[in-house]
Image: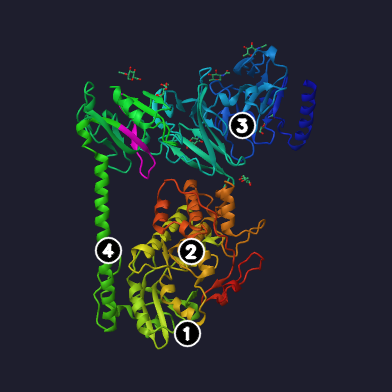
Amino acid sequence: MGILSFTAFFITTIVLLSLSDSSIAVDTIFGTQTITDSENSTLVSKYGKFELGFFSPPGRNSRYVGIWYKDIPVKTVVWVANRKNPINDSSGTLKINRTGHIVFLEQSTSTVVWSAKPNKPIEQISTPILQLLDTGNLVLRDGKDDENSEESYLWQSFDCPTDTLLPGMKLGWDLRTGFERRIVSWKSSDDPYPGDFSWGIALCNYPESMMWVGSEKYCRNGPWNGIRFSGSPELKPENPLFSYEFVSSKYEVYYIFHLRNESEKSRVVVNQSNGNVRNRFFWNSEARRWDVFTTVPRDNCDRYGLCGPYGNCIIGESPACQCLKGFKPKGNLMEWSQGCVRNKQFSCQDKDSSGFVRFKGLKLPDATYTWVNASLNLKECRAKCLSNCSCTAYTNSDIKGGSGCVMWFGDLIDIRQFQDGGGQDLHVRMHASEIGGNSERMVEKVVVVIVVVLIILCGLVLLAHRIRKVKTRKGLEEGTSVLIINQNYEREVEDIQMLFFDLEKIVKATNNFSSSNKLGEGGFGPVYKGTLEDGQEIAVKRLSKSSLQGVNEFKNEVILIAKLQHRNLVKLLGCCIQGDEKMLVYEYMPNHSLDSFIFDKTKCKQIDWSKRFNIICGVARGLLYLHQDSRLRIIHRDLKASNILLDSKMNPKISDFGMARTFGGDQSVGNTNRVVGTYGYMAPEYAVDGLFSVKSDVFSFGILLLEIISGKRNRGFYHQENNLNLIAQAWRLWKEGRPLELISPCSKDSNNLSEVLRCIHVSLLCVQEHPEDRPSMSYVVVMLGSESSLPQPKQPAFSSSKDTVSADSSSSKHGSSSTNEITLTDLGPR
Ligand SMILES: *[C@@H]1O[C@H](CO)[C@@H](O)[C@H](O)[C@H]1NC(C)=O
Ligand SMILES: *[C@@H]1O[C@H](CO)[C@@H](O)[C@H](O)[C@H]1NC(C)=O
Ligand SMILES: *[C@@H]1O[C@H](CO)[C@@H](O)[C@H](O)[C@H]1NC(C)=O
Ligand SMILES: *[C@@H]1O[C@H](CO)[C@@H](O)[C@H](O)[C@H]1NC(C)=O
Ligand SMILES: *[C@@H]1O[C@H](CO)[C@@H](O)[C@H](O)[C@H]1NC(C)=O
Ligand SMILES: *[C@@H]1O[C@H](CO)[C@@H](O)[C@H](O)[C@H]1NC(C)=O
Ligand SMILES: *[C@@H]1O[C@H](CO)[C@@H](O)[C@H](O)[C@H]1NC(C)=O
């Protein structure tokens, strides 16, 4: 066996030495071998992911043995052996000594600065070897045993973590030996000595994830509730980047995570010199740096016991600390750490003197004094709690199945409130008088009454709206001036005449429609820039002359559209009608359209991720307004990047809204089955059957989102390997758990990966094949703005046509043809 291993060792050495001569590129130390600082030698894991060697922290001379990533350019130390005891020159040697210990010696003085011992005597080990694995784990094992079997490890560095939790590393306890693995920060950025901050699992009946400063509790993620730690609603089992697990058995209690794609890199670090203390990082291979994925504590409410006993921390409220209902502040209002006391104490003798109030959406209180029985249900749990005088609260111990019983004894401390359905229920014991009869039923009744009242009100408003609309039209036909009631959102157009521009004025402003003033060719005709006499800049859209729409109808529509006002819509200033010439006058947008930024290799750098996110949210709000809040309830029908204009501050404004509804009719006259819209953005039911609804706009919005994220066009997008369009590519990456590869190189700098991920998730929900599966714009706006969990998207529609149909179809270039395309002929008259 020994000979075999040695042969293998020599072969590996020869092969790897020829690759790199500055380091001994092998992953294993046998018997009498050493790695020595003065020779600059290192151990490299088999596939070159990690390296073990000697290092000095920046600006220091002291030498440490450590492990770092080998295959990234940023030196990132994930483990240190002699963190308490550096050597002061470069004469260190690491080896296995004759009793099977791993020892790190200072050569010049022969002092042992660090050592680790095998978990069984040397006589029972035939070939002790020390091996660095590609997980970053340094293991001592018997050379004859399997390197992948954890049971065969006589010692492993994963059992003595320093400040970093790597995938596959256990955080927590081995109850058989009473041995704890806890992450402890460095003392400072240049000193690996154990610092004050640590992170581990607090052992109690209901184990919880906890951070300490010294021996004081610093921040509590809360107990494991079957799905996640109660205080981490953002931890989602279905997240595409990593899976995690919490094991609590008779033998072990630990948390562990694994990457879904093992070529990615992620680590969780407790860092004392960083105000955020604990961060999860992901390696961004494009930007070649670590991006922060999550941070703990997130906010002040995460500080342990900030609001004291029975205090509830609600971020966003002022003050953040409030008493739970039925409790009042104990001390001075400014000193929340004293917490709250009961309005009325319940009596132990009289069972009927107390009951429970259910609080929703909480992080469960400190679980140090708890009792758990996984086989009781909630009702039994209540009875059990009621029968023990010191029981103050109970709830399900496992929310996955809604089962089990956990009871609290003594004061409830470190509670916080989560919005968006993140937290859990807690039933808190109260004096019967605080419960107020059947409070939950009361709430239900009140809700029903409110809903009924709202429905009636909505009905009335709609009726009033109808009546007014009829009146408005009548008024116009009679040529009188119209009073338009302002509905909060909509612009009051006091003087209708203001909306009509003289042709003379427009001709002058646009320099007689000179070609140098031409901004481009929009869906319904050319657009010119102009400057009015008072200096106001305008954009004039000259509608194609073929229009058959009557002048009165046209005026009517202009008046209605001019009233739509929202900060994310381009403002229609008015129109100009002269003979058969019809023009629309808009406010001028100095930064032109979004497509000129996102698809341009150089200009795309001007919009970083935060700007992109702002644009995404703005477009979503503008579209929501069109769909729901405006009184016309407009379906855009041609939402695309070139229809999103940007003002001087890069705020997005949707243009061409209302056009399809109003002027799209022009196009359909000559060609009854032509669909307005742009392929690539068109929902399948719209492109194929001509059916449109708000959900076809949602689809186009989804495509637009993907384009903003990826910087690639959906139509004409051609993926080298797979001939996939953008949706298909996004879907594939999502399925494979690497959606972040979609991000445009221009916004790779984003350090808000969870925001990017959320946008990708939302976009996939928007492009689902069936319109009924797609979210409404109001839900989209909610999803973009919250942290709550999202439904899983279904298979999207893979439309892959590259052509545009609308007034400018003649100007669109046909891409190289592909057999997979839906061609225009499919859309001929049926
Ligand atoms: C070790 O490596 C460093 C940096 O590569 C070099 O400056 C130094 O001379 C090397 N020492 C020996 C003994 O090879
Ligand atoms: C290195 O120097 C420090 C401070 O001078 C000292 O405390 C430490 O014991 C030294 N280490 C060794 C191994 O001599
Ligand atoms: C190996 O190192 C350990 C730890 O320093 C020590 O206790 C043991 O005596 C050493 N064994 C030999 C044979 O030197
Ligand atoms: C995993 O990630 C790497 C690097 O990010 C990528 O090259 C590879 O294709 C991914 N593999 C899978 C199966 O997603
Ligand atoms: C800790 O945070 C500081 C300040 O942000 C940073 O300079 C240092 O590199 C961090 N240390 C680790 C191990 O990430
Ligand atoms: C949990 O409750 C069940 C049912 O009442 C009981 O049989 C079991 O002994 C309890 N377990 C503990 C640990 O108390
Ligand atoms: C109430 O529960 C506590 C904790 O489990 C226990 O120590 C105490 O004996 C119980 N009291 C009664 C009256 O059952």
Q: Secondary structure at mark 1?
A: loop
Q: Which residue is mark 4?
A: 459
Magenta region, mostly helix, strand or loop? loop
**Of callouts 2 and 3, the N-terminal one:** 3
Whether tag 4 and tag 1 are in contact, CB under 8 A, the answer is: no
Q: Which residue is mark 1?
A: 546
Relative depth, front residue between 291 and 239: 239
**Of callouts 4 and 2, the N-terminal one:** 4
Q: Residues within 10 Å of mark 4 (few under 14, many from 20)?
A: few
Q: Which residue is mark 2?
A: 594
Residue 128: give x, y in percent of width and height: 70, 19
Residue at the spot x=33%, y=39% of the render? 360
C-alpha separation, residue under disc 2 versus residue under disc 1: 29 Å
- Which of the numbered marks, if any, corresponds to residue 136? 3
Range shown magenta: 410-427
C-alpha separation, residue under disc 2 versus residue under disc 3: 45 Å
C-alpha separation, residue under disc 1 versus residue under disc 3: 71 Å
**Number of the front mark, 4 or 1:** 4
Residue at the spot x=42%, y=52% of the render? 784
**Number of the front mark, 1 or 3:** 1
